[in-house]
Structures are given as structure tokens and as C-alpha cells.
Image: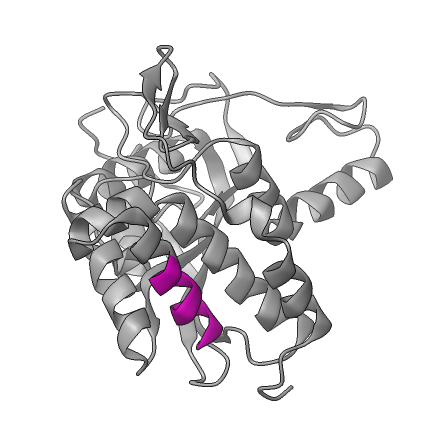
Amino acid sequence: MGNTCSFFVRKHSDDESKFIISKEKISSSNGESQVVEGREFHNDPESVYVLAKDDIEKKRLNEVLGYWIWQLNFQRRNTMDQIYVKNYPKNCRFAIGNVLHENPFEKRFDFVQMRYFAVALRANEWDEAYASLFNQLKPGGYLQILDTSIVKCTTEPELLDINQAFSKLIASKGQDYDIGSKLAKKMETAGFNVICNNKMEVPMGWGSKRSVRYAENMRSLYISIAPGLAEQLHIDIDECIAKINRACDSMGPTKATVHVWSYLAQKPLDAPKAISSL
């Protein structure tokens, strides 16, 4: 621990190629995707997801979603089980469903994991999402949640500027930047019994490999949406990227943190179907 930059940070700082956004403005779309300033984004008119969907973003997600590794290892140890995840083991298959649709898989589950939907759902869609998940679980089934606050806990002026710009960006799409703290109440409204409610304050860039990796991951996230942040900050994209880099470099020295909430909820054995407009 501590504030000394590790080799991991210097390695990422030296590899600037992953953080470059094309200076030539590109706006194109192919139905499912659109390219803005050299980065690929979703092009679904019903979606408010603001983050990129290209290979750089996939690499960023792979660095933090160790959950998938746990699931793949679990499946290899339990070869008779059929589990919906990434289809590397032969007993797995990957399927896409919309949490706002009524039971898109046409079956019910014992366990559902929902992770980092803070930038995926509008503020008024969470109740419907939890009602849908409630109805997709078997009686006695469990829902496990992990989500975060968009805003970082910091005193650093430039990181505060980035926070404010990000908050305005997602608010313009009808999202709630602080939804993580409100999820227990929404699960209870859907009919769940919340049996675990845990708030964590996660250090960013403080010196350990994990905290430094988290800070670098946030750098990649912010730079991926630099066009949107620049618009909110009323500056050009190059200036915005420089500001993001300075802000992320300051995370360790200023002891920046982010709040992460984890929940475990259970559907009662005698539960009726959740009330929903789906």
C-alpha cells in the first residue's frame, strides 16, 4: 500500500496507444453500432448505455470482471450442470436476454447475478427490472447484486470536474448516478427479502496492484467517453483527455475512493408473482 506509483502504473502510462481517440471525427453506423471519434458504441434507440463496445472496452471489462473466471472454474468442476455463461466449457452456453422483458429465457432460475447496471438502466426502469428478475427466480431463489456509484469520493478539483460531467451525461439520458445506494429498497418493493446489504469504499490508485488496476480501468472508461465528457465540460476532446489523465494520476496521492454496494436477496418460498407493467 501507499502512494508510490508501481511498475504497473508506469507500464500503462507508457502504453498510450490504447488511450488514443482518432482526431478525425468519425460518425457512422451499421444498425447495431455507431462509431464516434474512432470508438464503437451501441446504436440501439431504446438503450441509454453510454460506454463503448469495441475491443478496447472488452479488454477493460475483462480486467475487472473476475466474476466470469469464477463461473468458468465452477462449471469445469461441475460438469453435469447446465449454466448460462460464456461458452468455453462444453456444458455452458451463452444467451442474450433483456432484463426489461418478461422472462426472455422462458424458464426460471435458482440464482441470478446482476452486476454493474448503473449505466445500463434509466432511473425509472429499475423497478421493472427487479420485478422481471423476481418472476424469473424460483421460490426460494437468490438474486445477487453488485453495483457502484458513478461519483468518486475525492477532493481533487479536476476529478471533481470529471465526476460532475459524467453525472450530467448520464442524467441527460434519464439515469441515476447514485442508484447503488437505493437498490435494497427497490428489491424489497419487488417482493425480495434482502438478507445481505454491504457498502464498501474501494481505494483507487493507492499503490496496491488491485487499487492501481482499478484506477487505470477508470482512466480507460473516462477516455472512452471523452467526446461526451468534453461536451459537458465545454472543452475540446484533446483537452478533455489531458484533464482525464491528470485527474486519474491524482487518484492515489489524494486518496480517491469509490462506493460499491453488494446485496443478496431471496425470493420467499410462498411469494406471489411480482406486480409489473411488463
In the rendered image of this protein, does residue 126 appear above or below residue 80? below
Q: Residue at x 15, y 53 (%)?
A: 234
| 121 in magenta | no
The percent position of residue 167, horizontal first and vertical second, equals: 22, 56
Q: Quadrant of the N terminus?
A: bottom right
Q: Is there any visible trace of residue 111 in the rendered image?
A: no
Q: Residue at x 47, y 47 (%)?
A: 115
In the rendered image of this protein, does residue 26 appear above or below residue 131? above
Q: Is there any visible trace of residue 58 in the rendered image?
A: yes
The percent position of residue 120, horizontal first and vertical second, equals: 33, 39
Q: Quadrant of the C terminus?
A: top left
The percent position of residue 247, horizontal first and vertical second, equals: 39, 70
- The magenta span reads 242-250
Front one among 267 and 153: 153
Q: Residue at x 78, y 24 (%)?
A: 91
Q: Is residue 156 left or right of residue 60?
A: left
The percent position of residue 231, horizontal first and vertical second, equals: 19, 47
Q: Residue at x 18, y 40 (%)?
A: 173
